[in-house]
Amino acid sequence: MANLEINFAGIKSPNPFWLASGPPTNSGYQIMKAFDQGWGGAVWKTMGIPVVNVSSRYGAVNLGANRMVGFSNIELITDRRLSDNLREMEEVKKHFPDHAVIASLMVQTQKEWHQIVQDVQNAGADGIELNFGCPHGMCERGMGSAVGQEPAVLETITRWVMEVAKVPVIVKLTPNITDITEPAQAAARAGANAISLINTVQSLVGVDIDNFVAYPVVDGLGTNGGYCGPAVKPIALNMVRNCAQHPLINLPISGIGGIENWRDAVEFLLLGASSVQVCTAVMHYGFGIIREMTAGLDQYMYSHNFASVGQFVGKALPNIKPWEELNLSYSVKASINQEKCIGCQLCYAACDDGAHQAIDLDMDANNRIPRINEENCVGCNLCSLVCPVEDCITMIRKDNGSNPITWKQRTASNNIPTTFDDPLAGGLSHKVRQPLDGLRKE
Amino acid sequence: MLDSDQIFPPIKPLMDATEAHYESSRCLFCYNAPCVQACPTSIDIPLFIRQISTGNTLGAAKTIYTANYLGNTCAKVCPTEVLCEGACVYSKANIRALDIGRLQNFATHNAIENNHFFFSVQKAKDKKIAVIGAGPAGISCACQLREEGYQVDIYEARKNASGLALHGIAPYKLTNQEALMEIEYLQTQFGFSIIYNSPIETRVDLEILESRYDAIFLGVGMGRSAEIKIQGEEKTNCVGAVEFIERMKIGDVLKPFPKKVIVLGGGNTAMDAASESARLGAEKVILAYRRSQDQMKAFAFEYELAKTFGVVGMFNLAPIEILGNNRVGGIRFIRTETVNGKLLNIPNSELVLDCDLIIKATGQLKHTALFQNIPGLLIDPTGKVQIDPVTGHTTNPLYFAGGDAVNGGAEVVNAVAEGKLAAKGIIQFLSK
């Protein structure tokens, strides 16, 4: 087994897999159970003045046979008394001194912040996470994402915390903002030790179309909730890398958002996260998924010869650039493997209707294997993405790599289209069918 | 009635909503889908499956019924393994084909059970059409005609509609109750009348119809089982497969059921009769076919199914004499071989197999006498009614035809397609 241990801003953990603050970390019972099954750390469900919750709290997006590809909640922070949480936290730390227990906190006044930070430190918390992200219920009371969306407020509150903090402080960011790096920079300025992202995305998860109300329904009414689960992962990945690449942030990042297996976790790590947090997947499958996650990470590290997690944190960052630095001469074309093709012709429908009409059907209807029209193929990948067969449609490089040129370079040499009918228009290189050809195709 | 569910549990049981949800979500929604092309009634299968998966089960039923008036019967009795499901592209990737038949049953059963109707009859037209035979072809023809407002009377020789779907389909595929439920469902929507116990046979019968109706559709199917014309065929317990199955389906079963059964034949009816005998309690069921296994006309999956019921196949055995006193006691066979495409008996290779029931599944007779009473009706040398394949029009201007009487015995779904096609031919003819 590879060494999965991490030291995240001074918080040590046997592996990079932490439970995110949320329903799975509501009690000492759950966290004990999770550590027992292999989780490396847990961010305790946000503590503060206990709340009163509604009944009917979650809604989900299902896609075909897959349940909960997206998930939304309108639950608030802990509804348990602080003293109960602290007592249980002490007990957990007694049993698992080497696991990471991080206290998520959300209060309002400086006095409250000072008090609760000291309380959780006394209970043995290895770190503190400031919940500046919750996009529902709490933000209307001036907390959660209301803080995360105002970098100046975030900075002030973080400074209050740093005044009394003796353990590492992580600022948890909301994605409900145009530029995630602004609150992240504010956290850095305030002296926070790390950031974690993303919190949930403000959302309406769906509408009950027969009763004309949004889910989850509370006595005939709905409200906006926080969206998470696999569907938000791409948003989280981009925000993590934005923070990781920003020269003025320079803080360890705990990656959160739709992680449900080792592969998701590795993606976050490669983009600069040095720990990951999981909530929805545990709510879906239970703590047992940690077995797959640690085993998968171990296998990945073994196959890449990585001795520690730190060796590949941020390894993909140098290869992520602004669009204008991409090579415009790079050219791939689709190729259909005749042996593997099962003749569903989804690639044809997708390309003809949704792309560049670069796939033709055989005149003989009995031959259902489509053909690529390379002249029209722009190498968009769509056919290879819709193809249901593994490795049937592949994208083959056609340029010889000898003349790389970027938009930036072409701009510098005045070699870009600048007028509406410019002859440099990129689309002139392939045929577009006449409008009338679109009639009576079915 | 037989307690069919006990003896003949359905081989394609009704899906529940959960199974339908997961199964329907597997459909790829192929372009110009091969399953549709493989369906004789061209049901838009990817559409109805997508409708099920998006929670529009009623819309799915409408899609099905718009293409095929016997959408529920066909869902259960179609040899989907060689039609839609056989064409499913998944099989090319060694992935189980979509369970299209059962999804179709899920959607149509829901519509029937909840009395959801999708059709309304157009303004009444003054033309009247007689349909002879209330089997799948006749019912399908009648539905299409009624939809367009024509008046339709169906003359049925038996006391029930559905034809072979009722009398000839194995009960583990379709129960009589299920078959009749769909007829009732259709009749409620389309309002055709069925005149039961009214065989049309003689020239006089036909003349009455010819004088009263503007067009006549022949959906008479096939007749009783053919004879094999060997010595001893008249003995008790030597029965035709069609008659055996028909009686079984109304619960008229030999008691106690014979212990040793030999089924003669190699078609799908032979498979059904053999499987049913096994399920009814025969200790030994032999399927004896005079040609080789490869030459059986039955679908491979039907033979496989029969074998799962304990049926034993014996090939290259031609019956030459039925033994026994008054009752069947056995069959004397002779071994055969195919030489240069000809089936020859092998001299001195006779053998006797004991049995106490013989089921002859060696083909059915045509309604030749009826056809001969229709002036100018062209019949091919095998006894099939000749039609214009586009309109279903026969060589007698008043008559159209479809189903087994025309195709010599195909699937229910073919009869449904042909009945509908002929209805359109009739409408075109009467609109001139």
Image (tube, coloured by chain):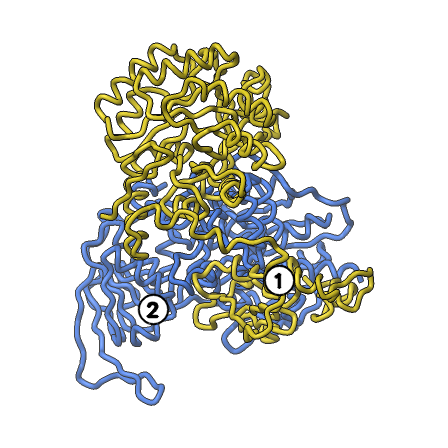
Chain colours: A yellow, B blue
Q: Chain of mark 1?
A: A
Q: Secondary structure at mark 1?
A: helix
Query: Which one is in front, A132 or B196?
Result: A132
Q: Nearer the viewer, residue A255 or B174?
A: A255
The part of the image, by quadrant, that contains residue B5 is: top left
Amino acid type at circle 2 is Gly
Q: Residue at x 41, y 14 (%)?
A: A116
Residue at numbered disc 1: A351
Along the horizontal axis of the image, is A257 left or right of B215?
left
Which quadrant would the C terminus of chain A be assigned to in this image? bottom right
| Label 1 environment density (alpha carbons within 10 Å; few <14, some 14–19, many ≥20) | many
Question: Residue B190 location, x and y as percent?
Answer: 65, 44
Question: On what subunit does the disc labeled 2 rest?
Answer: B
Amino acid type at mark 1: Cys
- Disc 2 to disc 1, C-alpha distance: 48 Å
Q: Against A167, is A54 above or below? A: above
Where is residue B332? Give x, y as percent: 21, 73
Say which element carries label 2.
loop
- Residue B399 placement, left or right of A194: right
Picture residue at 44% right of the left edge, 33% below the top: A194
Left or right of B123? Residue B356 is left
| Place of residue A342 in the rendered image (x, y in percent of width and height, measured from the top left) | 47, 65
Kindly identify which residue carries mark 2. Answer: B266
